[in-house]
Every structure is written in C-alpha cells, then in structure tokens.
Image: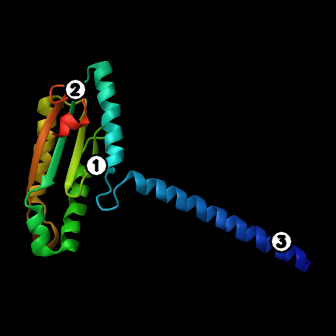
Amino acid sequence: FEDEHVRLAGTVSSLLGATLTRIVVERLLAEHSATDPLTSLLTEKQLTRRVYEETDRSRRHGDPLHFALVRIAGYSAFAAQNGSATAEGALRDLGRLVRANLRCADTGGRVGYEEIGLLLVHATGAEALAAVERLSDQVSRHLFPRRKRLRLEWGLAAFPEGGDDLPALVA
C-alpha cells in the first residue's frame, strides 16, 4: 500500500471509532436518563410519564390501578448514624428488592431522594395490598449494609378512588 492509502485508512478508522463511541455514549445516556443510577428503577420523570399513561388506560378500559409510595422508615437517622455511602447502599438494596418483587406489568421508580413509587396495574385492591405487604416483609427480613435490618413505611392509593391525577394519588 502507498503511504496515502495508509493515511486514508487511518483517518477512516479514527472517524469510524469516534462515531461508534458517540453512538454507545448516546445509548448509555438515554438509558441512564430513564433509570435512576442508584436504584436502577425509573427516574421520577419516567415514572410520572408511566403514571399518566396508565391512568389514561385505566380510565378508558376501567382496569384497576394502584399507586404505592414506600420509603425506609427512619432513613434520615439511618443515614446520619451510618454515613451516606451506607445509606446509598440501603437504597441500592431497596431498588433490587423492588425489582425482584414487582410483576412484569408493574413499574417502580425513585420519587425524591428516599421514596419509591410503585405503579401496580391490573391489580385489585387486595392484590395491590398483598404486593406491598410482600415487599415490606422482604425488606424487614433483608440484611442491609452493616447488617442492619430496616422496615418500610408505605401508603397505597387506588385510581380513580384515591384521586384523578398524579398529585392527588401521591398526596
């Protein structure tokens, strides 16, 4: 090969590498903007979008829909006593427990700093209550960082009985 061909191949290779890197970074950014990096659950923005989609669907089809808000009881005190790294580890573990306990159709997302929203679709009141109680039980039996046992505080709302929009559901 002539020097000119080698230089051209090097230039094309560099451009191709930069383009592939850009594509990978864009996909990673899109994924990370949809999920919370700590809990691997949806971000508040994405959860809100899903709540609006599902309330519209529930309104059209009359399907049951429930929303639960859960958080680690005494989280602020836990964080103050054990440090932010340990507290973040507890939130990471809570995210794993939420993902492991949700049905495929359900959605979990981080709401604020220490709260998790659960969107329970096509679940009767009894089924939604059982799902949140099952998660609460799993959390109480889980060993969190520093071998701590924690418990959940939670509330459960039904749509449309508990409110006709997101702010009413989480109030």
Residue contact between numbered discs 2 and 3, judged by CB atoms under 8 Å: no
Residue that lies at the very extreme toward the top in this rendered image:
61
- Check the image and name the residue furthest to the right: 2
- Separation of marks 2 and 3 at Cα, in angstroms: 62 Å
Indicate the secondary structure of the residue bearing disc 1: strand
Residue 45, image x and y in percent? 35, 47
Q: To which residue does mark 1 refer?
A: 109
Q: Quadrant of residue 46?
A: top left
Measured as percent of width and height from the top left, residue 53 is found at 35, 32
Residue found at x 29% / y 29%: 55
Res 84 quadrant in image: bottom left
SS category of the residue bearing label 3: helix
Please state which of residues 49 and 95 is positioned toward the viewer in this rendering: 49
Tell me if residue 154 comes above or below residue 32 in the rendering.
above
Q: Callout 2: 10 Å neighbours few (<14), some, many (20+)?
A: many
Q: Which residue is mark 3?
A: 8
Determine which of the numbered discs, if any, sits on residue 64 in the image: 2
Question: Of label 3 and label 1, which has the lower sequence position?
Answer: 3
Amino acid under label 1?
Gly
Quadrant containing the C terminus is top left
Along the polypeptide, which appears first: circle 2 or circle 3?
A: 3
